[in-house]
Amino acid sequence: MAILYVRAAPTTDLNRNTEWFTYPGVWSTYILILFFSWLMVLSVFACSPGMAWTVVHLSHFFVTYQFFHWKKGTPFAEDQGIYNRLTWWEQIDSGQQLTRNRKFLTVVPIVLYLIASHTTDYQHPMLFFNTVAVFVLVVAKFPHMHKVRIFGINADQ
Amino acid sequence: MITIPYITALTTYFSYGLLFAFGQLRDFFRKIFDWWSKSSLQGYAPICLGLEDFYVRRLYLRIQDCFNRPISSSPDAWFDLVERISNDNNKTLKRTTKVKRCLNLGSYNYLGFAAADEYCTPRAIETLKNFAPSSCSTRVDGGTTTLHVELEKCVANFLGKEAAIVFGMGYATNSAILPVLMGKGRLIISDSLNHNSIVNGARGSGATIRVFQHNTPSHLEKVLREQIAEGQPRTHRPWKKIMVVVEGIYSMEGELCQLPEIAYVYLDEAHSIGAVGKTGRGVCELLGVDTADVDIMMGTFTKSFGSCGGYIAGSKELIQYLKYTCPAHLYATSISPPAAEQIISSIKVVNGEDGSSRGAQKLAKIRENSNFFRSELQKMGFEVLGDNDSPVMPIMLYNPAKIPAFSRECLKRNVAVVTVAFPATPLLLARARICISAAHSREDLVKALEVMSEVGDMVGIKYFPAEPEKQQLEGDRVKLE
């Protein structure tokens, strides 16, 4: 079997917290992790596929909200805290809006929402929770929401 | 350009994701634990933010025994490594009294001056007796001895520049010079993989910094055109000064910069001076660039000359200006006299002025060693970065689990290697960095190759297909006949 090689071009992003997202293979890894977590939920809970997708969608919401839009700064100290006021979403691509990476990350929760709603046949209460989740995530990723802290939630002192 | 198998990229991201998830889980339980048990440090502020040292606590400490290994001899081709043990899963390490003799593949000992040398060491000891271990003063006060003057002349002659200025520390050279040369209203264009000292100096100068893609002169040209056309941010006035900062050999990549194509240049030759070029004069000689074309040449004495300190070489006016303004010259203690003598002696050996041909032999040896080692590794199927003739060769590991595996397995077989991971390198591109020295003999290199081949098979880092050996082909031909 031939090995598929990809070339990793060096980036100009100096922020070590976000430059890993510019290398090849990240999007595929993200999609594969979501797919395998669906399989794991199905095998652990033995529920219907629709419920499994809803569980995946909601846990994806919690995890990505926490790490993309809530936690600020970087997990290492070498950059001396210049990104301490920015969430990960505000840091990627050096703050440029509407890049390919950002568009991809906005589309993923929407696609998950569509799959989850379709496989549960648009029944309540799953539909309500799914809609709230996708609404919060997509609004958080709008270009107008860059560095905006509504009602001072998650702002610094 | 690094070529990585796609599956390896996927598994590397997945491994880091898993490590990250487990780290977060452990932090979560630690928070609950700490909230439950009363802390004895009431009223004290925390030293660092909890999330800032997440990487150190949850990822680095797991494989802490692969870094910071103490040695108890001089870093020659073979050295004595002190063994350490840990009772709490690598959170703390304790030194034992056991010592292991290992092959040293990690020191920047390019010309072999790190251990006692027959010409340099007696002279350095003589200087230690005549002068003192430290000059105990800054250059302007009382720290300029005859040695310092001779050293600066020696360095300027060696590089073919008009004058040079020498500092006690290589890192401080970069971080103290850049703020002096550049300031507000000026532009620094630096390679994306420049060393931390350059980044710190550039940030401290207050100049605007733009980064261009590593070793891509076309991108540099694009950035230059854009910046010259746009001018300063907000006011759009033309820039007062523009400087391009590149390195001779990049320490993590082992590549040479594309010097002939870049033109106001600051060249940091920390790794390349003394090690490349026919007579050891660095990348300028290797790439055929006239030293008059490079405006400012910077380098250190720690790598090839077996000493400490850094230098800047340039025109007489530049050096005179630096002597009036540079804080490392005015306020920092001057370079230690025995260290200066070591540099002078080692430059004399490299030039052949000590009356023997050892300098030329060393230079030929390191080139031969590097090329042999690199070609053998590539034949075995490893992914080795770096250009030909460069004594620094990183071997790509990628997966986070292979970093400690490679390091520990090599150590078990008495070969000491340096592994580098995030955040010194990009997340995906963890590597083991081999530094070849003129002090390595051919047997040492062959042993190292055997060990690496064995460990490479065990750990699974031969990402490229190995080339078949020539003897097998000839054997088949004989059988056919």
Image (cartoon, coloured by chain):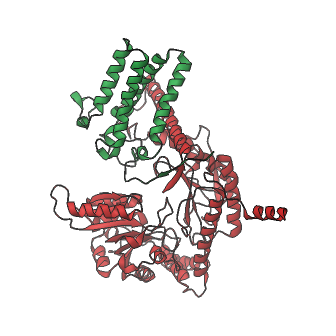
Depth check: B430 or B260 in front?
B260
> Which residue occupies 35% across, 42% down?
A100
Q: Which chain is green?
A: A
> Which residue occupies 48% across, 57% down?
B1
Occupied quadrant, residue B72: bottom right
Residue B265 visible in image: yes
Count every numbered label the image shows and give the total: 0
Occupied quadrant, residue B79: bottom right
Depth check: B69 or A45 in front?
A45
Chain B appears in which tint? red
In the figure, is residue A89 to the left or right of A56? left
| Quadrant housing the N terminus of chain A | top right
Residue A81 visible in image: no
Q: Is residue B135 above or below residue B47?
A: below
In the displayed image of the protein, which residue is found farthest to the front? B481
In the figure, is residue B57 to the left or right of A13? right
Q: Where's residue A110, x and y in %?
A: 36, 28
Q: Where's residue A13, x and y in %?
A: 37, 51
Depth check: B308 or A47 in front?
A47
Occupied quadrant, residue B124: bottom right
Q: Where's residue B333, x and y in %?
A: 38, 69
